[in-house]
Image (cartoon, rainbow, N blue to C red):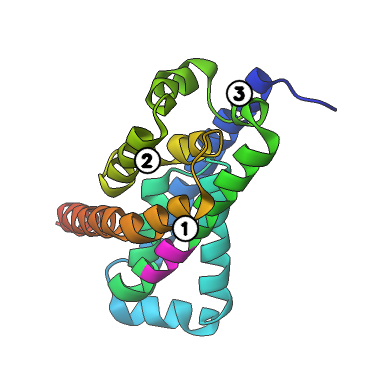
Amino acid sequence: MHLSAKASRKLINIMTVVCGIIIIFLVIYWYRLGIFTSQTKMKAYLADKKVIGPVIFVLIQIVQVVIPIIPGGVSLLAGVVFFGPVAGFIYNYVGICIGSIIDFFLARYYGRPFILHIVSEKTLNKYMKWTKNQKKYNWFFAICIFAPAAPDDVLCLLSGLTDMKFWTYFWIIILCKPWTIAAYSFALAFGAKWLLKIVGK
């Protein structure tokens, strides 16, 4: 069965809501296990997941970049909470970079019709004006990837439609992504600790 772009976006939105609900229940479950408030309990919970846990997490990060059904902030926070700041950052970085590279090739191979299954035409056209000058767009893309709160996934897809060379794209992702991931991870981890303190009182 062939889905229209509008139907695909609607399905992705529904899946995002469903995933959000599942995540809420999982957080409640994990909180009741005490893994957010006890380092010992968290280590015990992850003891039998030393290999498969990181692999599954990286795969989830790749999928959420290509098909954004899980809020990126949630998955970033999960990496830091479950694996610690260093390992969590590495797993987030690897998964997001691989997903971003996949986005580029999917957009380059399948073109605009593929992108419209993920983002609306209005959103895509909003950023298309920046692609008129390739050199300026390369700088615009690099700044957006470096800066937090930019629509990274949309711009990664959009880049596949431009004349940007793959290696230019690759190095922008590899060199600029870690700063954004680190900033988000730190902010989310700090916010989560603050919230848990409030709830624990």
* Residue 136 located left or right of residue 75: left
Choose the circle earlier in sequence order: 2 or 1: 1
Depth check, front residue: 122 or 67: 122
**Which sits in the foreground, 6 or 200?**
6
Circle 2 is placed at which residue position? Answer: 138
| Residue found at x 32% / y 55% | 176
Query: Could one spot residue 59 in this view of the protein?
Result: yes
Q: In the image, what residue type sits under mark 2? A: Asn
What is the crowding at mark 1: few (fewer than 14 residues within 10 Å), some, or many (at least 20)?
many
Q: Which amino acid is tagged 1?
A: Cys
Q: Is residue 95 above or below residue 7?
A: below
Dot 3: what SS?
helix
Residue range highlighted in magenta: 90-94
Q: Are marks 3 and 1 in contact (CB under 8 Å)?
A: no
Res. 28 image quadrant: bottom left
Image disc number at residue 106: none
Counting residues from the start of the chain, the first of labels 3 and 2 encountered is 3
